[in-house]
Amino acid sequence: MKEKIIVTGGCGYIGSHTVIELIENNFEVVILDDLSNSNEKTIDRINKITGITPKFLKVDLKDSLKTDEAFKAHKDASAVIHFAAHKAVGESVQQPLKYYKNNFYSLLNALEAQSENGINNFIFSSSATVYGTPNVLPITEENETQRPFSPYGNTKKIAEEILDDYTKSNKEFSAISLRYFNPIGAHESGEIGELPSGIPNNLMPYITQTAAGIREKLMVYGNDYPTKDGTPIRDYIHVVDLAKAHVIAVKRLLKKEQEKSLEFFNLGTGVGYSVLDVINTFESVTNSKLNYEIVGRRDGDVPQLYASTNLAKEKLGWSTNKALDDMISSSWVWEQNLRNENN
Ligand code: UFG
């Protein structure tokens, strides 16, 4: 019999790619999603790619009764992967309460409901933002976390602290927190990818929307950082590589291979690229010119952030396969497919 995994936020960008990898690894998947920043069409697209339709329940995890009902109906699940959260850094600065309310109510209701229904394995979708402005690079999981600049980032840091307290108090319960660096790219089928609502915050969708003519030009936020070309350096990771790490982490919990009841892993490639590197690679991959302008710095941006990937390699046996060209060309294919569909 297939093991069942509950995926909250499974219609979202990273969630949907992970659902595909889970299905391809022979898991049964139940998606809980409120569709606040995603689309139910994703379910059909997952079917198109895998031949299987995951079960879908439209649930707002802020509602504790509905959350409990959903978990009760699937109490035979072996683990939960919790993606459901708001994630726009800028919006979280404008509307902190929306972020604290949504991200914490959802997390706490999911934890409570799953424990009450005897599901004791949990994968948390965290972020490299918990490292704040690091003093050491590449950054290892041993580094102290710092209060992130944004309320969004702070929800990730505090969620990790909640998991720390909870795993200590409940000996049955194990969790893995996966700290993502900068996920970009899309599934090779071109069927699923990121669906940013409104004006994108992140670099990659902003680039592809500019190239597609939806945005007039890309603003490059600062070229006076202490980096090789003055623009900030990040560790971009292909979303499919990232998704695969979730499957490995689930298997680790199911086989009880974890060494501590709460483990943390960086998910990055270990290689940093500047904003101009990304733009130049986009131009060469697509053989086009991107309209961009260097403007002032954006609040809260750190000069450099890239991962040490040693722990994930050693303990999970996971490493990334896809290079920056692949990430960028798949993002571009996805953007073009989206445009064709909307026209
Ligand atoms: N950038 C631009 N112009 C844009 C958008 C981004 O120049 O229009 C630059 C940023 O200044 C930054 C780089 O591109 O130097 C990457 O920016 P992103 O917004 O794509 O990514 P961030 O590194 O700022 O944010 C990511 C995740 C967040 C997470 C954060 C913390 O998207 O969820 O990392 O590390 F909180």
Image: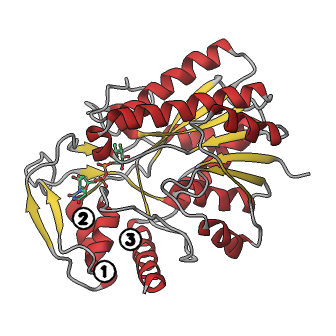
Is disc 1 placed on a helix, strand or loop? Answer: loop
Query: Which of label 1 and label 3 is nearer to you?
Result: 1
Q: Amino acid at mark 3?
A: Ile
Is disc 3 placed on a helix, strand or loop? Answer: helix
Residue 19 x, y percent position in the rendering: 66, 57
Is disc 2 placed on a helix, strand or loop? Answer: helix
Q: Earlier in the sequence, mark 1 or mark 2?
A: 1
Counting other residues with Cα less than 10 Å from the Cα at mark 1, is it few (<14), some (14-19), or many (20 or more)? some
206 displayed left or right of 10: left
| Label at residue 212 | 1
In-front residue for pair 94/156: 94
Circles 1, 3 touching at the beta carbon (< 8 Å): no
One can see residue 140 in this view: no
Cα separation, mark 1 vs mark 2, equals 20 Å
The residue identified by callout 3 is 328
Q: Earlier in the sequence, mark 2 or mark 3?
A: 2
In-front residue for pair 1/114: 114
Residue shown at 48% from the left, 65% from the top: 322
> Is the shortest distance between ligand 1 and the CB of mark 1 under 8 Å?
no
Q: Quadrant of the C terminus?
A: bottom left
In-front residue for pair 8/342: 342
Counting other residues with Cα less than 10 Å from the Cα at mark 3, is it few (<14), some (14-19), or many (20 or more)? many
Query: Which of label 1 and label 2 is nearer to you?
Result: 1
Q: Amino acid at mark 1?
A: Ala
Q: Amino acid at mark 2?
A: Asp
Residue shown at 18% from the left, 75% from the top: 216
